[in-house]
Image: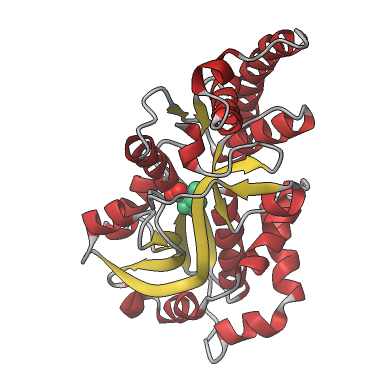
Amino acid sequence: MMKTWKRAGIAAGLSLSLILAACGAEEDEEDTTEGEIPEDTEENGADEGSDEEAAGNIGEEVDYTITGIDAGAGVMAAAEQAIEDYELEDWSVQPSSSAAMTSALDDAIANEEPIIVTGWNPHWKFAVHDLKYLEDPEGSFGESEDIHTLVRNDLEADMPEAYQVLDNFNWEGEDMEEVMLEVNEGTEPEEAARTWVDENEDMVSEWTEGVEEVDGEQITLAFVAWDSEIASTNVVATVLSDLGYEVKTNSMEAPIMFGAVAEGEADAMVAAWLPGTHEQYYNDYEGEFEDLGANLEGAKIGLVVPEYVEADSIEDLQ
Ligand code: PBE
C-alpha cells in the first residue's frame, strides 16, 4: 500500500514539475531582454516598485498556484481560507499528495525556481532546505497547534494495555523529525521507526511503564500518509507490537480517519492536529471518540517557500 501511494506521488510530482519547468522557461525568455523596464514598475510608481514587482513576479512565476497536498488535509482548507482572507482571487490551491508536494519542492529548489507549498512542521524539509513560512497577519492558518491522540470510546475497557501506552505516548518535534528524515532518505517507515525506538529506550519505557504484555491481540491504527503521521504512527505501532499486539496501520483520507475512530473501525489515531487544522473533523465526531490529549506540542501549518523567494508575507501575494 505504501508503495502505491509513493509511486502515485512521484507521478504527480513529475507532472507538477513539468508544469513548473514550462513556467520557468517562459519567464527565462522574458528575463533575457536586458535593460527593459518591467511594465508594472512604471504603473505602480517608484516607491512601491520593488515590493509590487516581487509580488507580481511570484504570482506569474508560479502561475498563481499554491502546490498543495491531499484535499482532505486541514492545511488545504486553511489555504483556501487564506485566498479569501487576503483577497487572492487569481490564486488557486492545487491538490496533490504529501509526497508529490515535497518532490515538487525538491525539483523547484534544484532549479532555483519559485514555488509556494502548503507546509507544516514538524517536517524534515526544514532540515534539508532553507525554507521560510510566509507571515500570516490575518491568522488564516491559526496559531501553534498540538497533535492529539484519539481512541475509540470503548478502548480503555477492551484493551487497557494499549490504552495506557497511547495515553502515555508523548514526544517532541525533533524526535518526530528524526524518524521523518530517515524515511526521506529512503528507509522503510517500519525500519526507521524500529531504529528510533531502539535508540530511545528511555522515552519508550516511560510510555510502557507498568503495562502488561498481551498475546497477539489485534489493534488497528488509522492514519493519513502525511510524512509526519507516517513517522508517529509507525513508532507507536512498533511499541505496541513489542508489547505483543498484532498491529495494523491503515492509511486513509483525513475525514475518514476521524470517522473510523468514531465508528470503532479503527482503535486509535495519533494524528489529530488541534485546535485549528482538524477542528471541523473533530467537531463532526465530538463525543464519539475519546481525546487522550497532546502527544506533541508546538506544531504549525502555513504557506512555505524557499528562502530565495522574495515574498515574506501572504500579503505580498496580493
Ligand atoms: N498536515 C500534517 C495535516 C495534519 C498533519 C499539516 C498536512 C493537515 O493539514 O491536515
- Outermost residue to the front: 46
Task: Name the side, left or right, on which 248 lies relative to 138.
Answer: right
User: Foreground residue, 24 or 96?
Assistant: 24
- Does residue 268 sit above or below 83 in this rendering? below
- Does residue 106 sit above or below 24 in this rendering? below
- Does residue 151 sit above or below 60 in this rendering? below
Task: Name the side, left or right, on which 91 lies relative to 170.
Answer: left
Instruction: Name which quarter of the figure residue 180 lies in.
Output: bottom right
Which quarter of the rendered picture does the N terminus lie within?
top right
Q: Residue at x 42, y 44 (%)?
A: 73
Q: Residue at x 71, y 51 (%)?
A: 183
In the rendered image, residue 115, in percent from the top left (x then y), is placed at 62, 31
Q: Residue at x 50, y 78 (%)?
A: 165
Can see residue 250?
A: no
User: Foreground residue, 120 or 147?
Assistant: 120
Instruction: Name which quarter of the figure residue 205 lies in.
Output: bottom right
In the rendered image, residue 298, in percent from the top left (x then y), is placed at 52, 68
Q: Residue at x 38, y 48 (%)?
A: 140
Task: Name the side, left or right, on which 165 lies relative to 311.
Answer: left
Q: Please name the colour scheme applied to the rendered image.
A: secondary structure
Which quarter of the rendered picture does the C terminus lie within?
top left
In the rendered image, residue 159, in percent from the top left (x then y), is placed at 40, 76
- Outermost residue to the bottom: 210
Instruction: Name which quarter of the figure residue 196 lies in.
Output: bottom right
In this figure, what is the number of numbered marks?
0
User: Foreground residue, 133 or 280?
Assistant: 133
In the rendered image, residue 67, in percent from the top left (x then y), is placed at 54, 32
Can see residue 166?
A: yes
